[in-house]
Amino acid sequence: MENTTKSIVLKKLLEAGENYISGGELSRSLNISRNAVWKAVKALEAEGFVIESATAKGYRLGNGDILLPELISGRNAVILSETDSTNNYAKKLAAKGEAAGTVVLAETQIGGKGRLGRKFESPKGSGLYMSMILRPRFDISLSPLITSSAAVAAAEAVEELCGCRVDIKWVNDLYVNGKKICGILTEASLSMEMNSLEYAVVGIGINTASHDFGELASRVTDLESETGVRVNRCELCGRIANRLEYWLDNMESRLHLGEYRRREMLTGHMITASFGGKTITGKAVGIDENANLTVETENNGTLTLTSGEASLIRKI
Ligand code: BTN
């Protein structure tokens, strides 16, 4: 099968959107035989595209979950079948001048990075592994709020597409039914001369399709298993990117913090937290104006945690 025939048929199906396009119309407009159309359809299906066919109507692209730049509407998207880390790839693009708003997605990452030097497992086709390039124009003092905005954006998009409740665990993990479904890693390059952010890359990993998490299964899950919804990763990515841009455009107002606090799951409960080599226990009392976690410790002191890791000991 000629690669070009296949990609032209795909382009036509994409243009038709939810409408059917008949085999006859495809063969006429592309000047190929009906048999060549049929072969192209079969070749696309073999690649994983879901193509619905109906008698007397023709073909249309089904609601599959294929990563294609054309399916992420209105923004520049780079799709990779495999990479070490989409964050690394996006940082290289950003350093070469790639525009803000560009997203990098991969089917799988062989060196997916988590926070605190951990690995982020990224099995092929089972998750949305996306990194978005940002060039924030707001004051550098607001940059610690980028990650909390991304957490809210991702929570909103998942809620819309899956119809489920999403909780945020400080700093930036998303939970459904008490198990983690998403992690976020933000990396940035500072311009020392300008005392500003040259660029930031927000990396978001969401487990979308049901798969075996092995020994992590008691703590980690995926959207399909929890909600029964198999999201389209391109649609999820587009919605997250749009919401993130909205919150970044309104950063001075810190409006997203209301949405963050509403979903934050440690507040009001006894927690243990580790930061800078120390471990403390106390009651999480809230999220402050810089998205830090405020904790009342057992000796009645109040601590403001700016980063690190916290976990629930018991609900109060
Ligand atoms: C965490 O849970 O500690 C953060 C995980 C962040 C994973 C995402 S997947 C896309 C991007 N590329 C990476 O290497 N990491 C982030």
Image: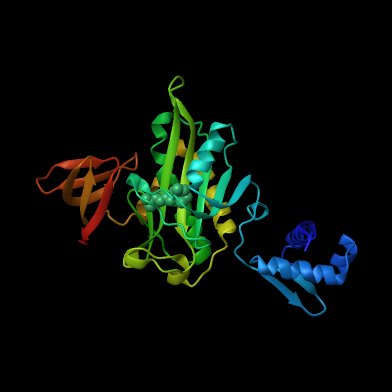
Where does the image place residue 269, in percent across and percent down from the top left?
A: 22, 57
Q: What residue lies at 79% left-to-right and 58% top-to-bottom?
A: 8
Task: Specify the quadrant that holds the N terminus.
Answer: bottom right
Is 63 displayed left or right of 4 in the figure? left
Where residue 198 appears, as percent x and y from the top left, is 49, 29
Q: Is residue 272 above or below residue 192?
A: below
> Which residue is outermost to the left?
299
| Along the viewing direction, whichever of 241 and 13 lies nearer the viewer | 13
Residue 217 position within the rendered picture, expressed as x and y whole percent measured from the top left: 34, 67
At which x and y percent is residue 33? 88, 68
Tell me how the rendering is colored: rainbow
Number of marks drawn: 0
Residue 291, above or below 205: above
* Left or right of 122 on screen, residue 27: right
Query: Could you tell me if residue 170 is visible in this image?
Result: yes
User: Furthest residue to the top?
Assistant: 193
Please say whether residue 254 is visible from this viewpoint.
Answer: no
**The quadrant where residue 3 appears:** bottom right
- Report the quarter where the C terminus lies: bottom left
The extreme bottom residue here reads 55
